[in-house]
Image (cartoon, rainbow, N blue to C red):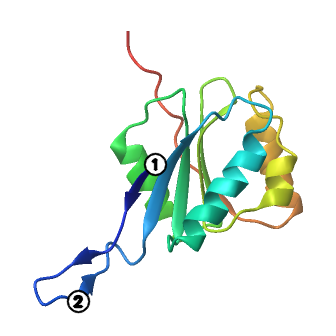
């Protein structure tokens, strides 16, 4: 787990980093139990004081720019998502663990992104779709 916490200023008071604490976690989003794991991670990080949580696919290396974009987007949307080129989900950001939504996603399939968007629309949750995650170059 990689987390960014509040920093101390020279006078001892906390300097807020872009307005809120945040956390990044890597989870195997291709496993069928990923929804429960994502909800657990988000719930745990929020309990630890994070306001915005970004979960990345453990099997992918994402750019720092994409992760920063996700944190900024969470200021304006309930959920942020970056797709993989194959319709899977490479990055998912939330400020609350939306268990009901996460349970409906067929993780690790080409339908994962479509089902996330459909479920969020039915639940009236705003989703900001980020640019697709670049494939690593070989």
Count of marks placed on residues: 2
Q: Which quadrant of the view contains residue 19?
A: bottom left
**Residue 15: x percent and y percent?**
25, 81
114, above or below 77, in the image: above
In the depicted view, which residue is nearer to us: 84 or 56? 56
Q: Residue at x 47, y 52 (%)?
A: 24
17, above or below 61, in the image: below
Q: Which mark is residue 13?
A: 2
Task: Identify the secondary structure beneath mark 2.
Answer: loop
13, above or below 133, in the image: below
Q: Residue at x 53, y 53 (%)?
A: 54
Q: Residues within 10 Å of mark 1 (few under 14, many from 20)?
A: few
**Which residue carries the number 1 mark?**
1
Choose the circle earlier in sequence order: 1 or 2.
1
Q: Residue at x 38, y 9 (%)?
A: 138
- Is the Cβ of the residue at disc 1 closer than 8 Å to that at disc 2? no
Task: Identify the secondary structure beneath mark 1.
Answer: loop
Question: On the rendered structure, is 96 left or right of 15?
Answer: right
**Residue 136: x percent and y percent?**
42, 20
Q: Which mark is residue 56?
A: none
Question: On the rendered structure, is 131 left or right of 4?
Answer: right
């Amino acid at each position: 787990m990689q987390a960014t916490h509040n920093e101390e200023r020279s006078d001892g008071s906390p300097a807020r980093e872009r307005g809120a604490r945040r956390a990044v976690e890597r989870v195997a989003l291709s496993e069928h139990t990923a929804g429960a794991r994502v909800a657990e991670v988000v719930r745990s990080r929020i309990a630890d004081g994070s306001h915005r949580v970004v979960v990345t696919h453990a099997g992918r290396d994402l750019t720092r720019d994409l992760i920063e974009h996700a944190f900024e987007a969470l200021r304006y949307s309930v959920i942020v998502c970056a797709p993989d080129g194959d319709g899977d989900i490479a990055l998912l950001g939330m400020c609350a663990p939306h268990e009901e939504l996460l349970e409906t996603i067929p993780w690790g399939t080409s339908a994962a992104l479509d089902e996330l968007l459909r479920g969020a629309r039915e639940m009236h949750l705003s989703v900001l779709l980020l640019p697709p995650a670049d494939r690593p170059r070989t």
